[in-house]
């Protein structure tokens, strides 16, 4: 601002010298150095204000662009894939055979085929109960293997989804995209935990049923031995052969 004022003063002095050196010109030109200097200063202030307004508008435009990026949605979603994996695992669990995952069936089975009930009843009833226990164990192991196979089949899908979500999170243009990618990663983690719970839920009953079958077989064996050992000895008798001859 001081430089502009000095420039305006110098211009006014130079112009006054020219006018003084040219008497004829002085009759036609009227120059006010003070007014000229003030006009230059006013123009300089207006130019500075315009520059400030341009800078402010630029900052506002940049802020709007950033807000738009922060509000932009993530251009991808793995929710459908994750829901499909969860539905597949749930379907395998719902196909569980015999007494698996049903409290009432477990209570009924233990009261009729396991524990002390294994050694009760006639020989035919004990044989039928042993057959039922064997079928329960085989079915539970089959269910466990199916669910484990289904969970293993979900691994490639989950791996692809994880890679895509991590890439989307790293390349997110705004806060909303980063948050949405993070939410989907958490959903993927929940689905993997559900698969793990499903595997454990299938394997544990299979192991428990096999252990119960072994214990019941021991109880049944003890009862059968007790029945055999308490029978009376051999009693001789007359035998008729060859038409009584």
Image: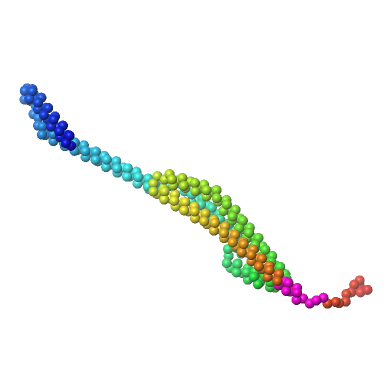
- Whether 88 is drawn above or below 235: the answer is above
Residues in magenta?
Answer: 223-234
> Which image quarter: residue 29?
top left
Residue 221 position within the rendered picture, expressed as x and y whole percent measured from the top left: 71, 69
Compared across the picture, whether 158 is left or right of 57 comes to right
Quadrant containing the N terminus is: top left
Q: Residue at x 66, y 62 (%)?
A: 135
- Whether 189 is drawn above or below 13: the answer is below
Look at the image and tell me whether residue 11 can be seen: yes
Q: Residue at x 12, y 27 (%)?
A: 14
Compared across the picture, whether 142 is left or right of 8 comes to right
Q: Residue at x 71, y 68 (%)?
A: 127
- Whether 41 is drawn above or below 182: the answer is above
> Which image quarter: residue 198?
bottom right
Q: Residue furthest right?
A: 245
Look at the image and tell me whether residue 94 can be seen: no
Is 226 contained in the magenta span? yes
- Whether 94 is drawn above or below 179: the answer is below
Residue 28 position within the rendered picture, expressed as x and y whole percent measured from the top left: 8, 25
Residue 171 position within the rendered picture, expressed as x and y whole percent measured from the top left: 43, 44
Compared across the picture, whether 226 is left or right of 154 comes to right
Q: Residue at x 70, y 71 (%)?
A: 222
Quadrant containing the C terminus is: bottom right
Instruction: Tell how many labels.
Output: 0
Compared across the picture, whether 153 is left or right of 18 comes to right
Is 7 contained in the magenta span? no
Residue 101 position within the rendered picture, expressed as x and y whole percent measured from the top left: 58, 63
């Amino acid at each position: 601002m001081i430089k502009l004022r000095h420039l305006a003063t110098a211009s006014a002095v130079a112009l006054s010298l020219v006018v003084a050196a040219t008497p004829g010109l002085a009759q036609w030109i009227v120059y006010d150095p003070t007014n000229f200097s003030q006009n230059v200063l006013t123009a300089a202030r207006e130019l500075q204000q315009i520059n400030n307004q341009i800078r402010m508008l630029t900052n506002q435009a940049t802020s709007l662009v950033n807000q738009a990026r922060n509000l932009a949605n993530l251009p991808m979603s793995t929710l459908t894939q994750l829901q499909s994996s969860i539905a597949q695992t749930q379907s395998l669990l719902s196909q569980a055979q015999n007494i698996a995952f049903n409290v009432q069936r477990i209570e009924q089975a233990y009261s009729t085929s396991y524990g002390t009930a294994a050694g009760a009843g006639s020989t035919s009833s004990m044989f039928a109960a042993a057959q039922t226990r064997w079928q329960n164990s085989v079915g539970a192991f089959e269910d466990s293997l199916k669910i484990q196979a289904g969970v293993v089949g979900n691994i490639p899908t989950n791996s692809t989804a994880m890679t895509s979500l991590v890439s989307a999170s790293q390349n997110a243009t705004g806060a909303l995209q980063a948050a949405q990618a993070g939410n989907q990663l958490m959903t993927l983690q929940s689905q993997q935990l559900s698969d793990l719970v499903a595997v454990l839920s299938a394997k544990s009953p299979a192991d428990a049923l096999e252990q119960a079958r072994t214990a019941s077989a021991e109880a049944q064996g003890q009862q059968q031995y007790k029945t055999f050992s308490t029978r009376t000895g051999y009693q001789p008798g007359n035998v008729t052969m060859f038409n009584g001859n």
